[in-house]
Image: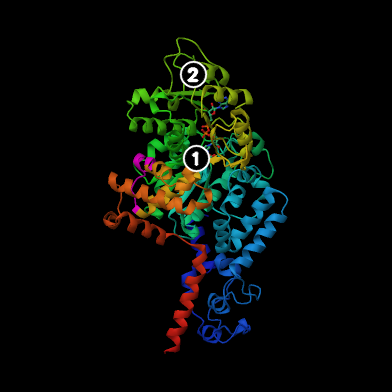
Amino acid sequence: MSLSSARVLRTLLKRPLPSTSSRRASIHISSIMSSSASVAPAPAANITQSHPPAVSSRQSSADYDTAYPIEVRKYLRTYGLTPPAVESFETQEKRCLQLLENKQNPIDKYQYLTHLRNTNVNLFYRLLSGNVKEITPVIYTPTVGEACQRWSELYTQPEGMYLSFSDKGNLHSIIQNWPHNVEITVVTDGSRILGLGDLGINGMGIPVGKLALYTACAGIRPDATLPLTLDLGTSNEQLRNDPLYLGSRRDKVTADEEREFLDELMAALTERWPGIVIQYEDFKNPFPSLERYQNTYTMFNDDIQGTGAVILGGFINGVKQSKVAAADQRAVFFGAGSAGVGVAKQLVEFFMNEGLTEDQARKCFWLVDSKGLITNDRGDKLAEHKLYFSRDDNEGKQYKTLEDVIEYVKPTILMGLSTIGGAFTPEIIKRMAELNKMPVIFPLSNPSSKSECTFEDAIKYTEGRVLFASGSPFPALEYNGKTLEPGQGNNMYVFPGIGLGAILSKAVNVTQSMIYASGKALSESLLPEEIEQNRMYPDIRRIREVSVVVTCGVIRAAQKAGVDRELGLRNMDDKALTEYVQKRMYDPFTEGKKVQDEVKELASHLSKL
Ligand SMILES: NC(=O)C1=CN([C@@H]2O[C@H](COP(=O)(O)OP(=O)(O)OC[C@H]3O[C@@H](n4cnc5c(N)ncnc54)[C@H](O)[C@@H]3O)[C@@H](O)[C@H]2O)C=CC1
Ligand SMILES: CC(=O)C(=O)O
Ligand SMILES: [Mg+2]
């Protein structure tokens, strides 16, 4: 059967997926009129059944909130489908936190939170917003790493779209199956999931986790987000032989095949949802797609650009503390992939803004990959993205190990984007501390097991002088009577604001200037007391406020670049723009109130008839 005839058949067999608003349109007058009387449950059966009964799988998961008053439950036709008590947000949170605490393993906590998101979306986001520091490590790095590794083993429900290479030619029609209007998608092919390698379609945990952060941090409505995983084969033989693996068992498609598929995908997504923002995530080789689509679609690559921006943000504050001028910086990058090159390029731009020429700025960087320092005369064919930083001043000498490179360069900065856990050994950290008053050491690989060093080691071996940020979170430490908080250099500080800024400004493209602006805005989002505490990044608990600052910076940059189509925002001063952004953000704490207000308004209207 062709896809289009399958769709017709399905349409005939099934009633359409009702949206919350269409369901609300078929109001149950008697239930609302009787609801104000008391909390005593009037039988749900008093509801006139003018159309098929509400089926749980057809309701929005937000509708089953035990915080909803009786009249709202009747209005939503969930009366009787939730326990009788009407709970406060505090009681709900207490139960959820207790349940979380009782779970022994991070993955059990992850599964519980997944269940919660699918059964009461507003409660999930209230819980996340109120406990962002505690819960982010469960739904995002590091735990999402294990969730992806075990995705096929633990699978219970769909949470996004899966598109296979064999669907090529039909992507446009398959995408029509998604039942909501989408403003933003995160798309991966699973080929480089964190530092864990090619996980094929098991990588779905990443789009799901990133989009949960879009909602929690930048207030993009949950139903306007689309987690998207491309099943383009996998080079992971173990997965292909795993009987539980949920993807196709073919080898990875070729670069040409991938390009053709992505061309069709980009067109299909944009045709279905004009203006959609498309975030590329965790592709093994993401440079060609960024180059190909960045001037044609509203898209960006989080690993290259988001990571560049977040490190720029922290680095601007770090430089102020270390007081080493741009011209005197020498940065060794351990790892020269998408993230390494993305960060280095972003810092080149910063150094140029600090007065260096491009060549002077570029020469401040020494990139190391699995074969050692990247030089023109190393003897291997360098991937294109490495050429810009390849050194020609090594006088014929090759430096194979990180120790050798450090002795040669005597760096002020050591970045880790290598996926090699523990690569920054005590000796390396000590050497950085000998070379610098305040060494910058950023072990940025994820998840925690891949971090190039721990916060504890960085503090111990530099005697507390390190300027530290890691990709995954580490706990705070007591050192010499002081509590030291590690920085978290993770793109989660910027991608929510980049996405929201692009959506609200209706940007036709995500320009490099918008990316730079996100990092700059992040650096300016610190409170005076955070600056006083020598922090490079704001407290993660303020991420929603921070995302508003980042969003405004991105919108202004879009306006300056002339890629914005929401021209009304141009006339707003900064205060008005900030308020506009805040008002446009989904807030799980007031979401239920909106429904209650609708019910009240309707009851009052009906009483006047
Ligand atoms: N903190 C953050 O926000 C972000 C962190 N990352 C993390 O950065 C890591 C790298 O990501 P990508 O650059 O996208 O991956 P990639 O696969 O493109 O690059 C990895 C690089 O590490 C090098 N490498 C591998 N083994 C090595 C060894 N033994 N010695 C020296 N170099 C070695 C490779 O040659 C390559 O240049 C991952 O763990 C990822 O999770 C990525 C994006 C954002
Ligand atoms: C944080 C992130 O995007 C990564 O590790 O790939
Ligand atoms: Mg990533």
Furthest residue toward bottom: 609
Q: Secondary structure at mark 1?
A: loop
Occupied quadrant, residue 263: top left
Point out the stretch of residues depicted in magenta.
505-516
Residue, disc 1: 534
Question: Of the numbered discs in the image, which one, if any, rests on residue 409?
Answer: 2
- Near-viewer residue (437 or 503): 437
Residue 220: % across, % down? 46, 56
Label 1, label 2: how far apart the Cα atoms are: 27 Å
Any magenta on residue 508?
A: yes
Give the class, few, some or many, for how many residues have Cα within 10 Å of label 1's Cα (few <14, many ≥20): some
Residue 153 left/right relative to 565: right
Which corner quadrant holds the C terminus?
bottom left
Furthest residue toward top: 396
- Near-viewer residue (476 or 8): 476
Residue for point 51% across, 41% down? 490
